[in-house]
Amino acid sequence: MAEQTFYYELPDGALREVVTTETDPAPPDGATVLTADEYNAKKTAREADLTQQQADTQAAERAQKKNAYDALNAANFDPAVASTLSGYTPSTSGVA
């Protein structure tokens, strides 16, 4: 019997792709049946959201480290020590 692929969105928002040889499989409880295009669009959108969330988190972490570095420098810590303590490494681009 040939394999078929079914696509579902579960009640918790998770996406599921099921490959089966069953003729008419029952969908998971409470699941919404999706077309392949709907499934792929939702999956792509979620991946883009995750990528953006990761970029936002990295930017916030870098800003927090820079703020700590700046505060340590303002308190007259050696820049190397401020870098070590804060986890921030200042950019050296444009420095001769």
Image: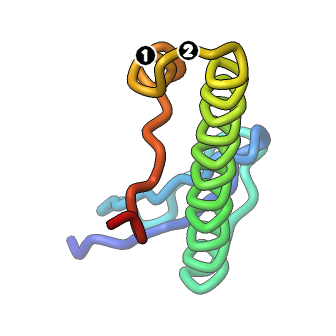
* Amino acid carrying mark 2 in the image: Phe
Residue 49: x, y in percent?
Answer: 67, 61
Outermost residue, bottom side:
37
Whole-percent x, y for residue 32 in the image: 75, 59
Q: How is the image coloured?
A: rainbow
The numbered mark at residue 70 is none
On screen, residue 4 versus residue 14, left or right, reads: left
Task: Say which residue label 1 marks.
Answer: 81
- Name the residue at the left extreme: 1
Specify the amino acid type for callout 1.
Val
Q: Nearer the viewer, residue 95 or 62?
A: 95
**Position of residue 53 in the picture relative to residue 44 (left or right):** right
Residue sitting at 51 percent across and 63 percent down? Answer: 24
Query: For mark 2, what is the residue?
Result: 77
Residue at figure coordinates x 62%, y 16% from the top left: 76
Q: Secondary structure at mark 1?
A: helix
Examine the image and state in which quarter residue 38 appears. Answer: bottom right
Identified at 63% across, 79% down, the residue is: 41
Crowd class of label 2 (few under 14; some 14 to 19; many from 20; radius 10 Å): some
Q: Quadrant of the C terminus?
A: bottom left
Label 2: element kind? loop
Are the two marked residues, 1 and 2, in contact with CB atoms closer than 8 angstroms?
A: yes
Q: Is residue 32 left or right of residue 89?
A: right
Relative to 35, does residue 43 appear above or below in the rendering?
above
Q: Where's residue 50, x and y in %?
A: 61, 54
Q: CA distance from mark 1 to mark 2?
A: 6 Å
Q: Nearer the viewer, residue 54 or 46?
A: 54
Q: Residue at x 46, y 59 (%)?
A: 17
